[in-house]
Image: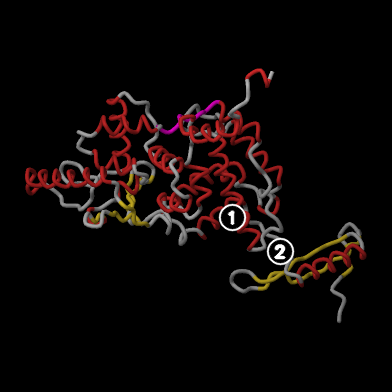
Amino acid sequence: MADPIKKITLQNGTTRYRFVIDVGRDADGKRKQLTVTCDTQKEAKDELARLRHERRTGQLIAPSKMTVSELLDLYLKSKEDDLEESTLVGYRNALCHAYEYLGHIRVQQLTDAHVESMVAWLLVAARRRGGAKGTGLRTTTADGVLGRLRAALRLAVRKQLVARNVAEDVTIPRKARKADRRNNKRPDPWNVVEVKEYVLGIRDERLFAPLLLGLMGLRPAEVAGMRWADIDFETGTLAVANTRTMIGNARVLEKDTKSEAGERTLPIPEPVKLALLSFRVLQEAERATMGGYYIDSGYVFVDLLGQPMSTRQLREQAYLLMAKTGLRQVRLYDARHSCLTFLATNGVPDTILAAWAGHTNASFTKRVYVHPTAADMHEAVARLNELLGVSGVRPDAVM
């Protein structure tokens, strides 16, 4: 077998040793080859042996000129069949910062230092909107950017474009996280007293029933997507199977639930059932009043003409009523947190709690959605009283 290493002489008289090795095939099945030039024959032999070993063990990485931007395009393309449109938009929005900061770099030249530098930039200068332009992003937003970049680089590893994921061990600095929590403390979800005050304050409002659906733990998109056909008053249940969410806070996207676990059937609390029955009667009266102008859309959350309303309108209506009732403003989504916290602190088992929320993982439900307050700690205090309140001990005996 002929020696693949060839001795060559350059125009300036310098001697080099060169070989060509097959490194696989491209997407079209065309053979790909790598040409390697070394200073000495020994270096060439060692490099040839290394490359042959990597090829034999499936570890050979062929040279590629693919940039980070091209990799991110490939990654987003690979997700089109797996993700909902709204989720894919979120991925694109997260990766716009990676495109801007790292997009020009070749994937095979990307290093940990590049990714760490991007993280530092995200935290101090990457903001485009939602505050002073050129300031830093929240650490949660930076986490999202980093997470999507990690996923794109995992794809690069699987396709043997790179040997390792240089973003895998890069994290947001702990000091930045602590500073972000300190400077951007989010208001706590409503406690039990506030929820009850809100319910009492809005019970005469037209949209009382849809707002109660949010207070029983449904996502805003699930409230907006609820149809009368999904509600069975005879069995006292409602099926969560359809959502109407917003893309870019401007366009409504109707789709099925966020996940398979999100598609669930829930028993309807009696106050919610009564409110829904009253609201259906009210809609019938509105239909009769509006006549041919009324649109029988079949949705629960509709305006006076029967047109389905969006999560944006649900949020705006809720905020108006928070102000009207004198309650502090919290995110509409936090009503879900309040509901799940109440259920968790009142003995509902973890598996039921997760199923009610539409999650597959009970630990995720408790970690993200359950926020016990000091008022919720009474059970713990009662148990500590039993532990620490030693009866029959004279005060002078412990001095």
Dominant SS of magenta comes to loop
* Numbered circles on residues, count: 2
Q: Where does the C terminus fall, quadrant-wise? A: top right
Crowd tier of the residue under label 1, counting other residues whose Cα lies within 10 Å: few below 14, some 14–19, many 20 or above = many
Task: Calculate the distance from the C-alpha at mark 1 to the C-alpha at mark 2.
Answer: 15 Å
Q: Tell me: 374 left or right of 229.
A: right
Viewer-nearest residue: 112 or 33: 112
Residue bounds of the magenta highlight: 183-190
Tell me the amino acid under the disc marked 2.
Ala
Residue 177: percent from the left, percent from the top?
60, 33
In percent of the image, x 79 and y 69: which residue is there?
20
Q: Is residue 73 above or below residue 59?
A: above
Q: Tell me: 39 left or right of 61.
A: right
Viewer-nearest residue: 251 or 329: 329
Which mark is on residue 62? Answer: 2
Tell me the amino acid under the disc marked 1.
Leu
